[in-house]
Image (cartoon, grey):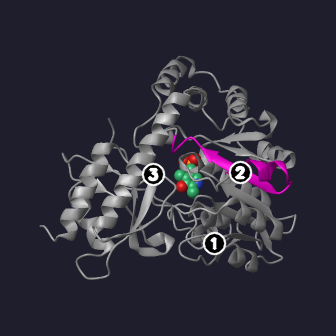
Amino acid sequence: MPPVSTPPVSSPPGGARPVPRPGILAIAPYVGGRSTAEPGQRVIKLSSNESGIGPSPRAIEAYRAAAEAMHRYPDGGAAELRAAIAESFDIPADRIVCGAGSDELIHLLTTAYAAPGDEVLYSEHGFLVYPISAHAAGATPVKAPEKDLRADVDALLAAVTPATKLVYLANPNNPTGTYLPPAEVARLHAGLPGHVLLVLDAAYAEFVDVADYEAGLALVEGAENVVMLRTFSKLYGLAALRLGWAYCPEAVADVLNRVRGPFNTSIAAQAAGVASLRDTAFLEHARSHNAEWRAWLTARLTQMGLEVTPSVTNFLLVRFPDEAGRTAADADAWLTARGILLRRVTAYGLPAHLRISIGTAEECEIAAAAIADFLRGEA
Ligand SMILES: *Cc1c(COP(=O)(O)O)cnc(C)c1O
């Protein structure tokens, strides 16, 4: 075979090169939770808020069965999945739009409703995909300060300008694990002009077991400018399949259906999503596992003298001491060397914290024991 040679890159006349729209190169690419350690080492991955106990066995079965039809395009409208969601949540199917993860829906909403010169508002420690999507749209991301690691409605409303087009509120929020009660969310909505779209990102809603929480279904029903986002990536354990959905006012559903890819969710994701929704016993098991080990891990880490932000989600935000050798960065390096992967949250403005997802019982026990060893200064 002749040697393969790379043709020389020729400079186009005038040195011109394709240049992306303003804002694109301002994006700091999203860095996900790490998943690898030293070769041969057991990895305990608690860095991405994935399900501690994995998917429903029925979802795995549905995924396998879907393989036989992979030469066919999926149903672009995801009718069966939307019908299953509609039934589970008692909402109209025609106002549900499915996406390749709620990440895709965030990008579609931002690019559909915000243009260069517009502002996209979110709270200080809010999910990083919001500013990324704003930059991608050429719009300006704007952060409102939080109080005690919780979104502050007054600060959000004070940051609204005539240029504001969208407000994103993760409720509960990642990476803080905190939430706003329905009265606060209603106050935020009431303070927004009608042309501003309020997006309630309820990715962790299924884990919340306090009485004063609502994901936002009622608010969507009563308004033209509220969207609720949900995902199959967390409680349902389908993160790899990329599946999320939006509950929208009719006009917003119409917009999303115009801008989304015609086949944006795969046949396997749709099938596994339907099977997961119907396996209510499994979902209940996943929920109670999380509640049990979230309480256990919160208590253990608190006993060690660490500050744990009370969480209603499937992860904990933990503050480490400021003294050299015991910081969040030190802990992260020490744990990583032992295959225990937590998440640094410096990019969220929280350099002294680590985020830890609720894993299996054994993973929680191993991680807690390792953190205790680290704090005792063991080599
Ligand atoms: C994990 C997460 C999502 C879900 O993302 P997918 O794209 O559906 O996997 C959305 N919002 C927040 C705040 C999250 O933490």
Residues at circles 2 and 1 in contact by the CB criterion of under 8 Å: no
* Magenta segment includes 265: no
Res 137 visible = no
**What quarter of the picture does the C terminus occupy?**
bottom left
Query: Residue at the location (71% across, 32% down)?
Result: 82
**Mark 1 closeness class: few <14, some 14–19, many ≥20 residues within 10 Å:** few
Q: Which residues are magenta?
A: 215-235
Q: Which residue is mark 2?
A: 228
Q: Position of residue 58 (x, y in %)?
A: 49, 23
Looking at this view, is 26 or 285 the one in front? Answer: 285
Looking at this view, is 111 or 226 the one in front? Answer: 226
**Mark 3 closeness class: few <14, some 14–19, many ≥20 residues within 10 Å:** many
Distance between the alpha carbons at the discs numbered 2 and 3: 20 Å
- Establish whether ligand 1 lies closer than 8 Å to the Cβ of label 3: yes
Query: Residue at the location (31% across, 59% down)?
Result: 300
> In the shown orientation, is residue 185 left or right of residue 31?
right
Q: Position of residue 11 (x, y in %)?
A: 55, 66
Q: Position of residue 234 (x, y in %)?
A: 51, 45
> In the shown orientation, is residue 349 left or right of residue 110?
left
Secondary structure, mark 3, is: loop
Q: Pick whichever of labels 1 and 3 is earlier in the sequence.
A: 1
Q: Which residue is mark 1?
A: 14
Distance between the alpha carbons at the discs numbered 2 and 1: 48 Å
The disc label shown at residue 49, or none: 3
Res 196 visible = yes
